[in-house]
Image (cartoon, rainbow, N blue to C red):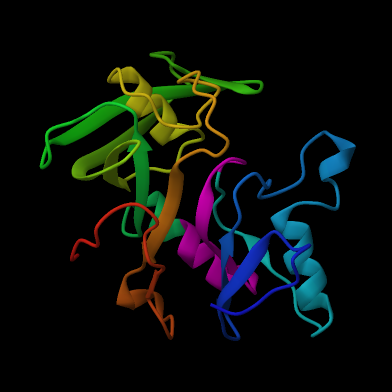
Amino acid sequence: MSKRNEKCPYELFYEDDQIIVVYKKRDVFSVSTEDKKTYTHNLFYYLKQYLKKKNETCFIIHRLDFETSGLMIFGKNEKITAKIRATFASREAKRYYEAVVKETIPLGTECEIRQNLLEKGNTVIISEEPESKEAITKFRAVNYINIGTALNIEILTGRRNQIRIALHSKGLTLLGDKRYSNDENKRMYLNCYMLSFPKTEGLSVTGFKVDPLWIIKEKK
C-alpha cells in the first residue's frame, strides 16, 4: 500500500489502465452528499483530482458507509465499470469484511441472515414492501479480542447499512455503530479487507486483500 497525503481520505492500493483500488479511511464519505461540506471532501472527489493530473478519470462501482473503512474499486472507463458492476449484481464478486461485536459468541458459530431492506431518506429499514431489496449477510465468529468477538463476514449483496442491520437484528452490538447498536466507541469496528472478481472479467489482477485489523487470517 502506497503512502498518501495525510489530507486525503484514502491510501492507493493498486492501479493500472483499467481500474484503481484504494483503501478508504473510516469516517469519510464515498461520494458527496447534500451537505456542502462533503462536496470536495469525499473519496470520489479526491480520486478524480488525482487522476485528472494524468488526464484520466474514474467511475463509481460500489460504496462503503461513512463509518466503514476498507477496500474500494473504481473503473477508469465506462466499459470496465459496467462489467464490474455486473459482477456485483450477479453476486460473482466476493466481498469480505471484519467486524467486532460486544457480545461473546462461541468461536466457530456461523450464521446466514436474509432480509429485505428499504431505503427511506437517510434511513434503511427491514421491509416486505415491493420496492425493498434482498440483503444476504454471512458471518463466522473467528476469535476474541479484549473488547469483544471478531467476526469474518461475507456479503452476497451490497445494500446500504446491510451488515449493521443484519448484526443488530441478531441482537448483536457492533462496536462504534451509533445508528443501530447505540454504541459510543470512537470508531465503528467494520472494515472491508478483501475483494475478488472472476477471471472472466479480464482484469490483470482479480484479488485484492489487506491484512485484517481484528480477525485471525482465514484461508479462502
Q: Was residue 73 drawn as part of the magenta stretch in this picture? A: yes
Q: Nearer the viewer, residue 219 or 34?
A: 219
Q: Residue 193 occupies which quadrant of the picture?
A: bottom left
143 lies left or right of 131:
left
Q: Residue furthest right?
A: 36
In x, y percent, where is residue 105?
18, 31
Question: Residue 11 at x, y = what percent?
Answer: 62, 69
For the C terminus, the image quarter is bottom left
Give the camera-side residue of 82 and 101: 101
- In the figure, is residue 198 to the left or right of 177? left
Query: Residue at position x 45%, y 20% from top?
Result: 181
Residue at the spot x=32%, y=77% of the render?
Answer: 199
The answer to whether 210 is drawn above or below residue 180 in the figure is below
Residue in front for this viewpoint, 155 or 134: 155
Quadrant for residue 111, please give it.
top left
Vertical order, 13 against 109 (above or below): below
Q: Quadrant of residue 139?
A: top left
Residue at 85 percent across and 47 percent down: it is 39
Magenta range: 65-85
Is 55 in front, or is 28?
28
Q: Residue at x 54, y 52 (%)?
A: 62
Question: Picture coordinates of residue 54 (x, y %)?
Answer: 79, 85
Q: Is residue 79 magenta?
A: yes
Image location of residue 58, percent across then percent down:
69, 68
Image height of 2 relative to 40, above or below? below
Number of marks present in the image shown: 0
